[in-house]
Amino acid sequence: MANAVEIEHATVFLGGHEILHDLSWTVGRGERCFILGANGAGKTTLIKMLLGYAWPLYGARVAVLGNRFGETNLVELRKRIAWVSPFMHQLTGTEWTGMEMVLSGIDGTLGLFRKPLPEEVERALAFMRRFRCEKLADQSIFTMSSGEQMKIMITRALLTQPDLLILDEPSVFLDLPGREFLLGEIAAVARELEELTIIFVTQRTEDILPLFGHGMIMRSGRIMCRGERIDVLNEKNLCEAFGMPVRIVRNHSGRVWAVLDD
């Protein structure tokens, strides 16, 4: 079976600036991995490349779920990829409701462009209840709080029954209770869907649950280090990645907090 992600020698320019430099990376099917890095490290551009929204220079090779870019229908491929980002709703200027945004995940669009089937609406409502956001069904996405928008996007992602789930800083705007609830749901999804490949992108070490056993740290558009969780999340690497002295505090479950070492 092909890997979930295969990237070879990818360099990406956006706005005349090199964002990713000669990046090669592989993620196996069913793997749960993290991408850690400071703002500007290139994390989101890497994700956009996986979705076909940013393209590398000629000579690179990018394949997702066994589909090589340039030889596949990206519209159909995106239906198998669930991308969750707190900035997704900004890609549409239309005031979709929470229900319309959730249902749009079925077609891999941002917003609903057809009349949904009754069973689709029923299933969407069930997922919205699970994430405690059913009250947002008829509310415009643009009038919701950041936390509410994130719950809608997570619900949209899981409704698609994806092969690859990409969580792009999903908890960045959530308060402490909201973040812990979200991380708990991610852990539950990982337990229930063992075959699901999950990529978790973050700038905060404490968001990286122990279930993410492999990962990498990015810096300045390059992979600074990669490997087993225990080897990547250490003080030396974190000091280099964030450019400041930090020390690590671990809790009983194995989560890692990076705190300023003053």
Image (cartoon, rainbow, N blue to C red):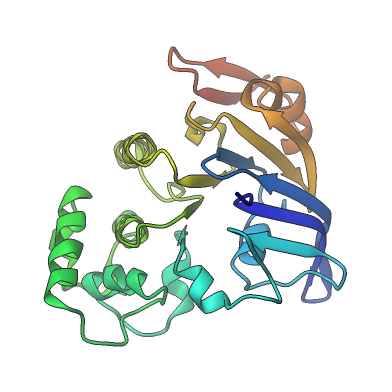
Residue sitting farthest toward the front: 1
Residue at the spot x=64%, y=20% of the render?
230
Q: Residue 146 occupies which quadrant of the picture? A: bottom left
The quarter of the image holding the C terminus is top right
At a point 86% along the width and 73% down the height, the residue shown is: 58
Q: Residue 132 in the image: state x and y as whole percent.
A: 18, 50
- Residue appearing at x 68%, y 76% in the figure: 71
Q: Is residue 185 left or right of residue 195?
A: left
Confirm whether residue 251 shows in the render: yes
225 to the left or right of 140: right
The residue lying toward the viewer, choosing from 15 and 163, is: 163
Instruction: Work out whether residue 243 can be spotted.
Output: no
Percent position of residue 11, x then y: 83, 63
Residue 84, image x and y in percent? Answer: 45, 58
Q: Check the image and report above or below for 115 versus 60.
A: below
Residue 209: percent from left, percent from top: 47, 30
